[in-house]
Image (spheres, grey):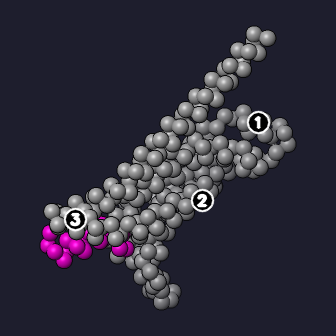
Amino acid sequence: MDAYITGFLVSCKGIPATVFVSVLSVAIGSVVGLLIALMRTSKNKFLSGISKLYVDIVRGTPMLVQALIFAYGIPEFIQTHLFYFKWANLIIPAIIVCGLNSAAYMSEVIRSGIQAVDKGQMEAARSLGMSKTMAMRLIIIPQAVKIILPAVGNEFVTLIKETSVLSYVGVHEILRKGTLLSAATFEAFPAYIGVALAYLLLTLPLSKLIAVLERRGKGSEKKIGEEKNKHVLEGGAA
């Protein structure tokens, strides 16, 4: 039993690195993803094509391969063709690759959120004299954010689990801690059970929180719909 407790406690030491990378990556993914989503919805074929190519490449290649390219491939390429280069800390390429990977998925989430907003909202904003950019910033995107919040939360939970691939590039996150313990004690089962429990410690509460927010969101939408129907009926009766 002590081996399992040790496996859990040692794995938990990797939680700060896992959470740090995940939070920054989702932040990067949200910003870059918004840019890509706007490019995808643009009428400019070049911008739309570039954004689609980016999404296809990132989603079509394993995150582990991307992490290896950023952590080891890019420094080697730069050193061979340009100048000496080495990452100050391997957590830097880890955050970059996770952020860019998340951006590809977030762009699709954001794009679907933008498309879910009633087209009449844009038409109404333009009729009031707003530019398309202003209408997107003040009217469309705020509404889209409310729609996609549960999906963004799910992406965060997914990214927490996917950061496990960073153990292969030397980042001391949860899996890396468990792997080092397994190598030191020659007890793989307790070590990796501890890793699994450490991930569950993060993902289960977040999943429950997202489910609650999703239910509240649906409840608010239902209430707004009932209010609209009530006003319509009252107007008809008048």
In the picture, the disc for residue 123 is: 1
Q: Is residue 217 left or right of residue 129?
A: left
Q: What is the CA distance from the residue labelled 2 to the residue labelled 3? A: 39 Å
Type of residue at label 2?
Val
- Residue extending farthest to the right is 129
- Callout 3: 10 Å neighbours few (<14), some, many (20+)? some
Residue wearing tag 3: 5
Image vertical order of residue 207 relative to residue 26, above or below: above
Q: Tell me which amino acid carries mark 3.
A: Ile
Amino acid carrying mark 1 in the image: Glu
Within 10 Å of the Cα at label 1, are there few (<14), some (14-19), or many (20+) other Cα atoms?
Answer: few
Disc with the residue nearer the chain's start (2 vs 1): 2
Q: Quadrant of residue 80?
A: bottom left
Q: Nearer the viewer, mark 2 or mark 1?
A: 2
Residue 19: x and y, percent? 43, 64
Dot 1 lies on which element?
helix
In the image, residue 155 sits, relative to residue 164, either above or below, namely above
